[in-house]
Amino acid sequence: MRKIKLIWDFRGPAAAKTAEHHEKHLKEYIAIEKLPLDITGFDVLNEMYSTAWMVVTEEYMIQVRDALKPHRGEVYAEQ
């Protein structure tokens, strides 16, 4: 089954801290909803731009998208 990386973008001087904190909320959502998902993270792309993200299977993509409203998504290539 295909996996989708849902991404939230954060900009500004507090972007890194905000993305890091947002990842905690993503993990909380996974636990509360009892979803079989466990891939989350955040990336600091530069001092003014960071992202938080979670990987979902297509089966859960609509549910998570509608509940959490990510800014964008992309097909996830496992590493």
Image (cartoon, helix red, strand yellow):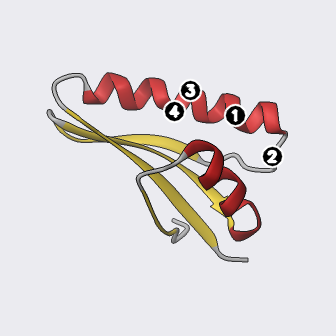
User: Of the residues shown, which amino acid type is indicated by label 3?
Assistant: Lys
Name above or below for residue 11 compared with residue 67: above
Residue at the spot of label 4:
23
What is the secondary structure assignment of the residue under circle 3?
helix
Of callouts 1 and 4, the N-terminal one: 4
Task: Answer few, some or many: residues within 10 Å of disc 4's Cα (few below 14, many 20 plus, some between 14 and 19).
Answer: some
Query: Residues under labels 3 and 4: Cα distance?
Result: 4 Å
Of callouts 2 and 1, the N-terminal one: 1
Q: Which marked residue is nearer to the observer: mark 1 or mark 3?
A: 1
Q: Tell me the number on the disc at residue 66.
A: none
Query: Residues under labels 4 and 2: Cα distance?
Result: 15 Å
Name above or below for residue 36 compared with residue 74: above
Percent coordinates x, y for residue 76 in the rendering: 52, 68
Q: Quadrant of residue 33?
A: top right
What is the secondary structure assignment of the residue under circle 1?
helix
Q: Are marks 2 and 1 in contact (CB under 8 Å)?
A: yes
Residue at the spot of label 2:
35
Percent coordinates x, y for residue 10 in the rendering: 30, 37
Query: Residues under labels 1 and 4: Cα distance?
Result: 10 Å
Name above or below for residue 62 compared with residue 77: above
Q: Are marks 3 and 4 in contact (CB under 8 Å)?
A: yes
Of callouts 2 and 3, the N-terminal one: 3
Which residue sits at x=68%, y=28%? Answer: 28
Query: Residues under labels 2 and 3: Cα distance?
Result: 15 Å
Query: Residues under labels 2 and 1: Cα distance?
Result: 8 Å
User: Of the residues shown, which amino acid type is indicated by label 4?
Assistant: Glu
Which residue sits at x=63%, y=52%? Answer: 66
Task: Answer few, some or many: residues within 10 Å of disc 2's Cα (few below 14, many 20 plus, some between 14 and 19).
Answer: few
Q: Tell me the number on the disc at residue 24.
A: 3
Residue at the spot of label 1:
29
Percent coordinates x, y for residue 43 in the rendering: 35, 42
Which residue sits at x=80%, y=46%? Answer: 35
